[in-house]
Image (cartoon, rainbow, N blue to C red):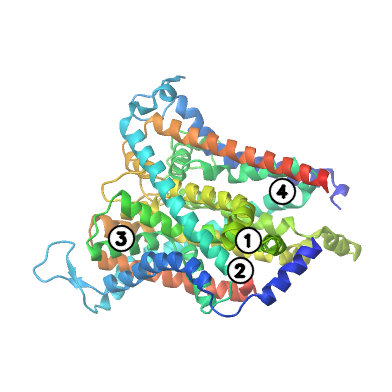
Amino acid sequence: MAFSAFATTTQAVQAPKRTSRVALLLLLPGILYLALFFLVPLVALVITSLQAPAEFGDIGQFQNAFRWENYATVIGQYGAQILRSFFYAVLATVFALLFSYPLAYFIGVKARKWPLLQNLMLVMVIAPFFISFLLRTLAWKQLLSDESFVVTGLKALSLLAPDAHITGTPVAVVFGLTYNFIPFMTLPLYAALERLDTRYLEAGSDLYSTPFTTFRTVTVPLSMPGIVSGVLLTFIPAAGDYVNASREFLGGTGTTMIGNVIESNFLVSLNYPAAASLSIILMAVILVLVTAYVRRSGTEDLL
Amino acid sequence: MSARFGLGRWLLPTYTALALVFLLIPIAYTFVFSFNDSIKSNISWRGFTLDNWTNVCNAQDVCEAFGNSILIGVVATVIATTLGTMIAIALVRFRFRFRSGISLLLFLPMATPEVVLGAGLAAEFLGAGVQKGIGTIIIAHTMFCISFVVVTVKARVSSLDPALEEAGRDLYGSGPQVFWRITFPLLLPGIVAAALLSFALSFDDFIITNFNSGAATTFPKFIYIAAARGIPAEANVIASAVFLIAIALVVISQVSAAARRRRLAATT
């Protein structure tokens, strides 16, 4: 094992510095593909976001322009939905982290003695991936509907007002976002905790630290790369999601998120510039937040 | 340290068990309702039946959507796995300029919200006057799968011992011979994992598909549209069957990996 690690480093040193023709041939098709279907679409979004309605045109017809006020218009019109998306996404990320940390800790640290159990629990964590995302969300819609035993039970215990609902409320949307992205949080946390050297924890308690202090000063910092990956993998899709918040799923009229607005502007009302400028805003905010977050948590080399 | 408290010792295992059960609730619900003797909408329990399982294609549009999803998944997986594996090998084995730029280009699609990827491609197709359909869905799925393939295969290439390839060259193996007889078989588990991941991502994608599908349907899109008027139980059957196959594949791969480790431990 040690020998192969050594061999890898010598190989890396010997690797030719010039651009080899083979490397170019290997890279070119995939990079061209991404340029054509990832970068060009981003440019197309920027161009579309600045378009103006075509003169004497029909609905959905636009011409190229530099209408920067498109951005001001959508921010004025959909400011509430934009803020709500990030608020819901932050809540879902925090809940997913609180839910996943003890789970990942048990699987990655406590269950090390039983590899079979460890694998079984990991399969259970990723199992939701294998059933359609939309059906999972619809299952929760039925399980939280007004006739469900969850709601009738809560009402019987007076924990919920007699005329209250769960589906169609922000609670249901945040719940759905949290549930759907839990595996994205648990897996990176598990990967980080699984490598945690438990002798550090013993050292903590040998030095008379309380379990909580050991957790705060040893376990959490050592699992930071997992926390950062998990937070990014949960926050980014949650902020752009529009399935949970849609009215046919867990949302209602007051839960519309930026994704819903982009979808309805693009696919229903054919207001492409509005949809495009909202997309650019969403992407820009996420890039800024992600960069700031990764800098702050000191894990730049993670990517 | 938790041995001092009887309760503390059981708290974490109990929580873990409850959390795992919680994660499985919607799967159990979907599975149970695949046996529901429903008429139109599959919401309230009306009795047990096997009809949905024996006549899945009774709800014809479900089957058609499912077939499209399989076709799209297979084609997108083959293209993305090929392109992604080539990039992964180049990234680990060669040095070249613009390396950080290429890494960024590979990372960004994974950090971009799906709704932006979907709207961007749709804007491109709109501008270029491309008719949306199965072809554009395949293009979209291939795009977001490539990065995941690169990440998965790269890990495998990095862990590969270059001495094995050197041995092949020392024994006068030609470049292609060394690649196909040594490198490729050693990379295969990583490539298979990447292909399975790609297929799973493609099969379950709804957000990007919705922007680029035009009139074509996929299994998730069918569910999204049907959600307004009620999902037929046959959709639950397909989802449950796919789930069981996926779990079986995971278990088989785990068992065979464990067997391989045992064989390896026995020989060395």
| Quarter where residue A262 is shown | bottom left
The circle on residue B157 is: 1
Q: Is A290 placed above or below B251 here? A: below
Name the mark on residue A107: 4
The alpha-carbon separation of the residues under discs 1 and 4 comes to 28 Å
Position of residue B8 measured from the top left corner of the image (x, y, whole percent): 80, 47
Relative height, residue B102 to residue A271 (above, below): below
**Are there few (<14), some (14-19), or many (20+) residues within 10 Å of tag 3?**
many
Q: Is the residue at mark 3 from the same chain as the one at mark 1?
A: yes
Q: Do the residues labelled 2 and 1 touch (CB within 8 Å)?
A: yes
Q: Which residue lies furthest to the left in this view?
A: A56
Given the image, on which type of amino acid does mark 2 rest? Arg
Question: What amino acid is found at the position of numbered circle 4 in the picture?
Answer: Ile
- Reading the chain from its start, which is encountered first: label 3 or label 1? 3
| Mark 2 vs 1, N-terminal side | 2
Between the C-alphas of marks 3 and 2, the distance is 36 Å
Q: Is mark 2 on a helix, strand or loop?
A: helix
Which corner quadrant of the image does residue B15 belong to? top right
What amino acid type should be assigned to the residue bearing mark 1? Val
Q: Residue A36 occupies which quadrant of the picture?
A: bottom left
